[in-house]
Image (tube, rainbow, N blue to C red):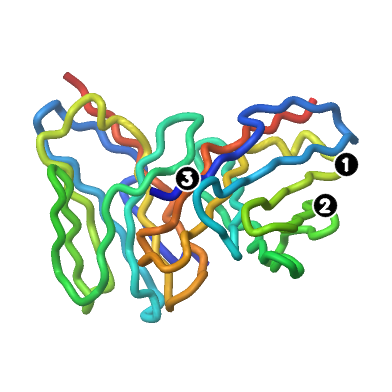
């Protein structure tokens, strides 16, 4: 059972446009929702994360929107650049301490000039 | 910041041999590390949780006798793929969280590309 569902699988955006990636989760015990960026042959790197007590978090061009009642969260990349072309993963974890992250299936973003 | 180093970055081995992958936390002590496997264009799937000084906890469907995990110190966890077969070819990634940090403290290694020929 996919605990975190991510869409779309792939996305092509014009340079300067807005990239939007969506995720939905089932487990209401999840209380931490990060987004990771991964380039080919590299490990994932944390982009931005949110906790369910806020509905939005912005860091530079990256914004997470969180809808607790719908159990959905999304990543918005403003002014998308070719350098943003990568695979993006949403994830979730629960509780405190050392619990592992559960990842979505990923979205391959291509930003074209 | 928290740094996790993974070695080797790439390894090619013959079918039937064993391969060891190391994951080190360079600037912090990690009582727990996580091992993930990622097939091409797929997500990261948790294989096991590595606990310092005790046995690893494996996810359902992961063979503990095939994927040996040792976490002998607070800065090193190793994953040994025993009797490797071509279907074990994958990208293996470790992760650790710096103690005392919020959940943002999850740090990933740069991954190991294993190719079994």
Give the labeled residue for mark 2.
B66
Residue drawn at (33%, 58%), measured in percent from left and top? A34
Tag 3: Cα neighbours inside 10 Å, few (<14), some, or many (≥20)? some
- Tell me if label 1 and label 2 are in contact, CB under 8 Å: yes
Point out residue A104 in the picture as x, y percentages from the top left corner. Answer: 42, 55
Q: Is residue A72 left or right of A87 when viewed as pictured?
A: left
Q: How far is mark 1 from mark 3, CA to CA?
A: 30 Å
Q: Nearer the viewer, residue B115 or A11?
A: B115
The residue to which callout 1 is attached is: B83
Asked if labels 3 and 1 touch by Cβ distance under 8 angstroms, the answer is: no
Mark 2 chain: B
Q: Name the residue under label 3.
A: B3
Label 1 chain ID:
B
Q: Which residue is drawn at 44% across and 56% down?
A: B106
**Quick one: label 1 or label 2, which is nearer the N terminus?**
2
Q: Position of residue B92 (x, y in %)?
A: 62, 42
Q: Residue B15 carries which label?
A: none
Q: Which quarter shows the C terminus of chain B? A: top right
Looking at the picture, tell me which residue is in the foreground, A21 or B91. Answer: B91
Q: In this view, does A64 lie to the left or right of A93?
A: left
Disc with the residue nearer the chain's start (1 vs 3): 3
Q: In this view, does B95 lie above or below B17?
A: below
Chain letter behind tag 3:
B
Local crowd size for mark 2, using a 10 Å CA cut-off: few (<14), some (14–19), many (≥20): some
């Amino acid at each position: 059972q996919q605990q975190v569902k991510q869409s779309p699988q792939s996305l092509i955006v014009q340079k300067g446009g807005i990239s939007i990636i969506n995720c939905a989760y089932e487990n209401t015990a999840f209380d931490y929702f990060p987004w990771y960026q991964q380039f080919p042959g590299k490990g994932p790197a944390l982009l931005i994360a949110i906790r369910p007590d806020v509905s939005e978090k912005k860091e530079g061009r990256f914004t997470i929107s969180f809808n607790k009642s719908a159990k959905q969260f999304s990543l918005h990349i403003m002014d998308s650049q070719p350098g943003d072309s990568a695979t993006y993963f949403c994830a979730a974890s629960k509780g405190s301490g050392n619990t592992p992250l559960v990842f979505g299936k990923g979205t391959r973003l291509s930003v074209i000039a | 910041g928290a740094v996790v180093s993974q070695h080797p970055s790439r390894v090619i081995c013959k079918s039937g041999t064993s391969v060891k992958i190391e994951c080190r936390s360079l600037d912090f002590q990690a009582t727990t590390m996580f091992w993930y496997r990622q097939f091409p264009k797929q997500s990261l799937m948790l294989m096991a949780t590595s606990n310092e000084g005790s046995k690893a906890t494996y996810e359902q469907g992961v063979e503990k006798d095939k994927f040996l995990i040792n976490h002998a110190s607070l800065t090193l966890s190793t994953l040994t793929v025993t009797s490797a077969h071509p279907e074990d070819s994958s990208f293996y990634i470790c992760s650790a969280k710096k103690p005392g940090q919020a959940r943002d403290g999850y740090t990933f290694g740069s991954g190991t590309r294993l190719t079994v020929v």
